[in-house]
Image (cartoon, rainbow, N blue to C red):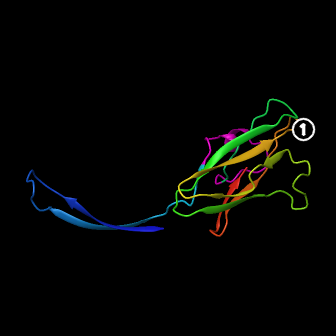
Amino acid sequence: VESFDSTLLCFVGSGLGAPPALRLPLTGSALRPWCQIELPPCDYHQTRRQAEGPLDPKNHVVEIVSLGTHVKNTKRFYVHNPTAEALEFAWRSERNPGLRIDDEDPIRCLVRRGRILPGKKDEMAFEYTPHTPETKESFWSFELLGKGVVEHFL
């Protein structure tokens, strides 16, 4: 959270150099994001989702379309760090904790951990290799380590 103080000046008439008719002190605060996730808009959670329950609108959707089975499909997108400090991140799968990472999951995260330098972007990538023609969903969490920030993805 950043705090700001300023003064709003209102000049009336055409007198250049005349004192302002109104001086109004202003204070405010702004919440700046730790990172900006650059994903194209997607209507999957509203129009094409086939699961039983609704999807939380806060979830980011990374949609990967495949034209066949046993074909590797990769989706890449960027996360931008607008801050003046490096950010460490980690991706975590939110599926059944009893499964190992490679147990028949057709969706894999290719960049599990990393560091985004100040003012820079880092590329994220997911790979989808479908074994059947059905729609598959996989839930992931993107965490900024040490910041208490977690974003959820489908």
Image quarter of residue 8: bottom left
Q: Please tell me whether the stretch drawn in magenta is mainly helix, strand or loop.
A: loop
Q: Is residue 50 magenta?
A: yes
Q: Is residue 77 above or below residue 112?
A: above
Instruction: Give the x, y percent position of residue 43.
Output: 65, 40
Residue at 86% across, 58% down: 96
Q: Which of the pair 124/58 is nearer the observer? A: 124
Residue drawn at 16 percent across, 56 percent down: 11
Does residue 109 appear left or right of residue 151 in this picture?
A: right
Q: Is residue 86 toward the left or the right of residue 95 in the image?
A: left
Say whether residue 149 is magenta. Answer: no
Residue at 80 percent across and 29 percent down: it is: 67
Q: Residues within 10 Å of mark 1 (few under 14, many from 20)?
A: few
Q: Residue at x 61, y 41 (%)?
A: 40
Position of residue 36 in the picture relative to residue 30 (left or right) = right
Q: Who is closer to the viewer here, 109 or 49?
A: 109
Task: Please give the range of residues in magenta.
Answer: 38-58
Residue type indicated by callout 1: His
Residue picked out by circle 1: 131
